[in-house]
């Protein structure tokens, strides 16, 4: 008996996912736990396994579709069962009779263009996919458009031009769709303020240069990020309100007694934020190894949902791409994010003399509901102290 496999609950309150691609075709035989589809949700790509063995009778969703939890993905039948086909229409002595499930409506515009035949379900599906039926060649009875036809080709729902000239329309899908949704949530749910300062990281620069060769021999690319992470971790211990979230329902500040740092990673698909867990118990060397691994897996879209969740504070390094200052958006539900700009040679007063130094611009965005500017500025001052005297990071680390 055919079994309808519905999109399962993927955890963490996820209600929908984008179907990136099918890993099977209709008519294929699959085994239990074999991957049948790749779906993207909350910035991660997840392979969905088959719940049983059998024959793929029908794929119900088109690639690129947004599928809600509980929607049917595919139908699995017994081995040897033929895939579903359009059944012939009923014929009587007066001709073709209408089928109850194939009731079709015709769309006729004022210019007299051809009728467009499609069931209400197909029309609804086309709206979900952002498609218009005009221009799609139907392969169903009397040329009606089927779900399969929607996947084969269509025209955009909105013409690719406006009154000013030609435009290009890019569907808001995948990582970019999730980023947009999360950024809007952060902007709506937080009272964000950004404070800025600078750090003389000349000593840190020299320390990293001295250790680069030794780290390279171990297969590790040593960046400034492990030092940024440890400086933030030590500073959060003295400013716990920045290592928190807000329980809106109970109107409570939830202070986290652990430190997990989210790291913004630029990928071809958009910005991902893998999380380095249990930072307090990891050395600079261990952090460097983990950061390298997470970064490579994030850029290769092999990162898991678990590795993208649980941050208590976030760091973003826009200086890597030439930026100086910015107002980074909080990675909701965190209440603070530190942005690191481009390290550059600047004239700096040291011991009463103007000398060239390596200067790092820093931008801290925080939720003003949770703490005030004095606390945020003092926190940022502590971060600067650790970065300007990196030996403290080793002296105070466990």
Image (tube, rainbow, N blue to C red):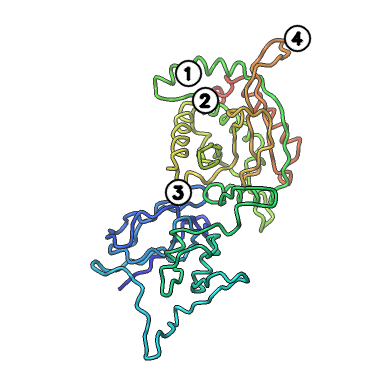
Name the residue located 44 percent from the left edge and 34 percent from the top edge: 293
Q: What residue sits right under mark 1 in the picture? A: 212
Name the residue located 43 percent from the left edge and 17 percent from the top edge: 214
Residue reaching furthest top? Answer: 353
Say few, some or many: other residues with alpha carbon within 10 Å of mark 3 (under 14 / 14 to 19 / 20 or more): many
Query: Residues under labels 2 and 1: Cα distance?
Result: 9 Å
Residue reaching furthest left? Answer: 80
Query: Residues under labels 4 and 2: Cα distance?
Result: 31 Å
Q: What residue sits right under mark 3 in the picture? A: 45
Residue 102 sits in which quadrant? bottom left
Residue 130 got which mark? none
Q: What residue sits right under mark 2 in the picture? A: 223
Say few, some or many: other residues with alpha carbon within 10 Å of mark 2 (under 14 / 14 to 19 / 20 or more): some
Secondary element under disc 4, as helix, strand or loop, is loop
Query: Residues under labels 2 and 3: Cα distance?
Result: 27 Å
Residue 310 position (above or below residue 132):
above
Residue 205 position (above or below residue 363):
above
Q: Are marks 4 and 2 in contact (CB under 8 Å)?
A: no
Q: Earlier in the sequence, mark 3 or mark 1?
A: 3
- Residues 253 and 161: in front is 161
Secondary element under disc 1, as helix, strand or loop, is helix
Residue 62 on image: x %, y %: 44, 60
Residue 249 on image: x %, y %: 66, 58
Residue 305 on image: x %, y %: 47, 48
Q: What residue sits right under mark 4 in the picture? A: 352
Q: Earlier in the sequence, mark 2 or mark 3?
A: 3
Residue 5 sits in which quadrant? bottom left
Say few, some or many: other residues with alpha carbon within 10 Å of mark 1 (under 14 / 14 to 19 / 20 or more): some
Residue 339 on image: x %, y %: 64, 33
Secondary element under disc 2, as helix, strand or loop, is loop
Query: Residues under labels 4 and 3: Cα distance?
Result: 55 Å
Query: Residues under labels 1 and 4: Cα distance?
Result: 32 Å
């Amino acid at each position: 008996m055919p079994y309808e496999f519905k999109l399962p609950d993927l955890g963490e309150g996820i209600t929908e996912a984008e179907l990136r691609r099918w890993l099977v075709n209709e008519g294929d035989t699959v085994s239990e736990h074999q991957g049948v589809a790749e779906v993207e949700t909350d910035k991660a790509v997840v392979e969905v396994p088959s719940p049983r063995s059998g024959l793929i009778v029908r794929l119900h969703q088109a690639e690129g579709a947004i599928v809600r939890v509980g929607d049917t993905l595919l139908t699995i039948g017994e081995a040897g069962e033929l895939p579903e086909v359009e059944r012939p229409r009923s014929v009587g002595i007066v001709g073709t009779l209408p089928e109850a499930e194939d009731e079709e409506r015709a769309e006729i515009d004022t210019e007299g263009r051809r009728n467009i035949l499609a069931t209400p379900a197909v029309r609804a599906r086309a709206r979900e996919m952002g498609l218009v039926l005009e221009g799609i060649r139907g392969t169903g009875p009397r040329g009606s458009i089927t779900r399969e036809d929607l996947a084969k080709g269509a025209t955009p729902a909105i013409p690719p031009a406006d009154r000013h000239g030609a435009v290009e329309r890019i569907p808001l899908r995948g990582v970019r769709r999730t980023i947009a949704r999360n950024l809007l949530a952060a902007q709506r749910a937080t009272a964000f303020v950004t404070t800025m300062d600078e750090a003389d990281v000349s000593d840190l620069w020299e320390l990293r240069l001295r250790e680069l060769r030794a780290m390279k021999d171990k297969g590790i690319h040593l960046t400034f990020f492990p030092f940024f992470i440890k400086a933030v971790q030590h500073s959060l211990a003295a400013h716990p309100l920045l290592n928190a979230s807000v329980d809106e329902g109970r109107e409570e500040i939830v202070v986290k007694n652990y430190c997990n740092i989210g790291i913004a990673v630029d990928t071809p698909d958009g910005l991902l934020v893998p999380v380095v867990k249990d930072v307090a118990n990891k050395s600079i060397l261990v952090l460097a190894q983990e950061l390298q691994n997470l970064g490579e897996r994030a850029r290769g879209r092999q990162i898991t949902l678990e590795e993208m969740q649980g941050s208590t504070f976030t760091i973003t390094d826009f200086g890597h791409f030439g930026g100086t200052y910015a107002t980074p958006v909080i990675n909701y539900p965190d209440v603070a994010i530190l942005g690191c700009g481009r390290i550059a040679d600047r004239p700096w007063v040291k011991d009463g003399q103007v000398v060239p130094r390596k200067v790092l611009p820093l931008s801290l965005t925080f939720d003003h509901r949770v703490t005030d500017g004095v606390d945020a500025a003092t926190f940022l001052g502590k971060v600067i102290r650790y970065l300007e005297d990196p030996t403290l990071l080793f002296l105070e680390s466990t």
